[in-house]
Every structure is written in C-alpha cells, then in structure tokens.
Amino acid sequence: MTFLSDFVASVNSIVWGPLMLFLILGTGIYLMYGLAFMPLRRIIYSFRLLWQGRQKEGEGDIAPFNALMTSLSATIGTGNIAGVATAIFLGGPGALFWMWCTALVGMATKYAEAVLAVKYREVDSNGHYIGGPMYYIKNGLKSHWAWLGTCFAIFGAIAGFGIGNTIQANSVADVINTTFNVPHIVTGITMAVLAAMVLIGGIKRIANVAGKLVPIMALAYVLAGVIILIINIEEIPAAFALIFTHAFTPTAATGGFAGAAVWAAIRFGVARGIFSNEAGLGSAPIAHAAASTNSPVKQGSIAMLGTFIDTIIVCSITGLVIISSGVWTMGETGASLSSLAFESALPGVGRYIVAIGLSVFAFTTILGWSFYSEKCVAYLIGERGIKPFRILWIIAVPIGATASLDFIWLVADTLNALMAIPNLIALILLSPVVFKLTKEHFNQLK
C-alpha cells in the first residue's frame, strides 16, 4: 500500500506540476483571446439568458437554467468551503488571487466546453440527449483521436467515486459529527438513502432537486458571508492588501501559519480553483449537453456563469471571511478553518452555517457527479452499465463517510488532472469551431 501511495503521489506531482498549470491557464487564456474577451464583455447578456432559461427552449431534456444548476450542484461543494481554506493554509492569502485568475480565464474554457457539448451531442436509445468531452472528441475530431474520448470516460467514471462521492460524504460526516455529534455511519446511511431517492429519477429529477436546493443554499451562504464581511469591514482593505501582495511575494511564517513561497500560492490557488469550479476538467459540459436549447452559444453563455458564481462569488466569500477574520494564521486547515472564521464573527451561529452549507453543497455534488460518472460508464459499456453503477454509487456513500480518505484524496486529485488532459487537447483542436459559432451568433444579434 505504501508503494502504491508513493507511486500515486509521484504521478500527482507531475500532473499538477508546472506543465499542467500552464496547460490549464494557457488554454483558458488562448480561448479568451480567441473569443476577443467575449465571456467578460457579455456577462450581463449571460445573466439575462440565465433568467430567460428557466423555461425550456428547443430540443433537450432539461431547461437551460436547470442545466446550470445541475452543473453548479457538482461544482459548489467541499471545494468552496474546505478547498478555499486549504489553499490559504498551504499557499497563504495570495492563493485566493490565483483562484480568481483561474476563474476568469476558466469562464472562456467553460464556455467552449458547453458550446461543443451542445454542438456535438447525441440522442440515446431512450431519447435522452447526451454529450460531453467524449462525444465532442468522437464527433468533432478525426477517428484517430477517438482514444482520447475513451481515456476521458475512464478517468471520469473512476474519479467520480473520489471527487464526487466518497470525499463529499466524508466531509459531511466529519462536520456533522463535530458540530452535532452524529455518528459518521448514521450520516453516511442517511445520505445514501436520500441520494438513492433522487438518482432513481435520472437527470430530470437531479435537475429539479438541484434547481431548488442550489440557489437557496448558495444565496443563504453568500448572505451569511456578506454579513460577516460587514462586521469585519474595517479589516477588508487589509485583507485585499494581503491577497494582492502575497500573490507575488512569499508569505512569512506567522502564528500557526508555516509560511509559503509564491509558487505555493500559484500552485494551490490554481489547483483548488480547478477543484472547485472544474473549468477544464470536462465534467460540466455533460450536464449542459442535456439542456433544451437550439443554440450552442446561448448555452455556453449560461454555462460560463457557473465558474463566475462558484469562484468569483462563493469562493471569494469564504476566502475573504477567513483572511479578514485573521484566523488563517492559527494553524487550522480545511473546513475547520472556515468554521473557525465564521464562528469568530458570529459566535454560536457561524459553525452551524458552515456545517449546514457544507452538508447541502456536498450532497448536491454527489447528485451532480453521479450523472457525470454515469454518462462516462454508459459511453464505455452502454446503458446496461447504468443500474450496476447506481448501486455501486449509493454503496460508496456510507463507505466514504466512515473511511480514512487521505489516499482517496490523492487519487481523486490525480484523476482530476488526468481528466483535464484529453479535454484540454480537444478544446484547443476544436477551438476554431467555437470561434466560428460565436462570431456567427453575435453577428446575427447585431
């Protein structure tokens, strides 16, 4: 086991090394430039489309709004609470700056993913719309690239059990046990039963649940964070000074904080940013492919808001609360650091906000990722694999809630990067299609 752990750790250091960070950020920058910064210029247009997208328009299984909520259900999870705190603990306040940079260029990446997902989607034997990286690789590139789609599906099917299932269940069980003294196994079984009730209904039920839970919980969490920032308003300028200063200069050791080099701020900011918003991983386009729309560009415009909402809004709230409260120097990490920050401003209430927020976010992530991994399994072995997959998925929830997941975290983090590689290659090769469709769409609007 030690050999296997060391091997995965060595692979992890390669796939999350400078080359991967350059590939993720470089692809985003290239797409943003090729789109003439459209994702930033058209953000108001995108929010307008999102509001209009509450109703179905064109062919597809779910409303465009619910497609984004399904995508957000998978992205807004432990990364927004525990992931941000871990990035600050390991990389210092400057890590938040690099999370922002990753998100801004990631908007272009997420846009391109969704455009291609709708453009190259298929209809399965049950009449459901299916798509994602494996389909735009298969249908958009020449046959000799087909192996990339297979690789993505393999990595996505396995990675889901880590990033989208056991890690989420474990985080919820830990925070519920710490806050409410509920045994891990009770939390695990409860989540498994609730997940089973939703998964039986497939994408439509997942989308309906996500369409209600995600907006309510995200707004409640953001509102609580804003209240804390108002309480700590005098510390906000200093917090921003720390973020921008330590994005480019090392963070000195202070209190329980061990200090961090600039490279650590970049590495953990980008890695945790990707873990949170998943721009470039290729997961979100699987949900957006099911949207009822006749316009790939419209759905892409809605999809890119997922990165903006996840990181620029929700992650920023967590990060600013942690930094402005000053608790980032106390040596805590993960959800415990976020809980400490909220509790310091709202004694007796803050830790419950984090516990409930993390629980709901993580539960919806389990739902969203079940759909992603299910579609990867179906791509590999057909629809006969869906029922066995769902059974395994539900069984994995209580196992994750009660297990020690240090190794699973490492494997999941590694598979995240491996998912990104075939997807990013496909985005670069198919970028002319994205640019062409975008130009045609906005020329028609004029």
Image: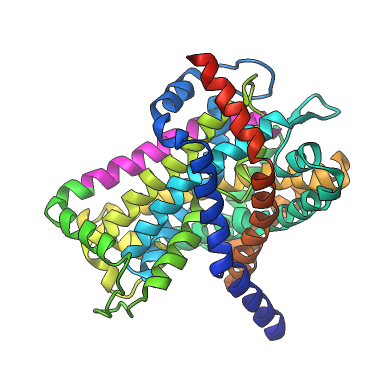
Q: In x, y percent, where is residue 174?
A: 48, 63
Image-based side of 443 in relation to 377, left or right: left
Front residue (pair 333, 243): 243
Q: Residue furthest left?
A: 234
Q: Residue at x 86, y 49 (%)?
A: 144
| Magenta span contains residue 214 | yes
Residue 262: image location, x then y, percent: 37, 72
Looking at the rendering, the stretch of residues picked out in magenta corresponds to 202-227
Q: Nearer the viewer, residue 13 or 71?
A: 13
Identified at 31% across, 77% down, the residue is: 257
* Magenta part, dominant SS: helix
Q: Quadrant of residue 46?
A: top left
Residue at image coords 62%, 21%: 295
Q: Could you tell me residue 124's position as x and y percent?
A: 82, 30
Colouring method of the image: rainbow
* Residue 393 magenta: no
Asked if residue 24 is positioned above or below residue 16 in the image, the reply reads above
Quadrant, the N terminus = bottom right
Q: Does 231 appear above or below 344?
A: above
What is the x, y in percent for residue 197? 66, 38
Quarter of the rendering containing residue 342: bottom left
Is residue 172 in sight in this rendering?
A: yes
Who is closer to the viewer here, 268 or 334?
268
Question: How many numbered marks have been drawn onto this rendered protein structure?
Answer: 0
**Residue sitting at x 71%, y 48%:** 373
Query: From where the camera sits, is residue 186 visible?
Result: no
The reply, left or right, for residue 393 in relation to residue 383 is left
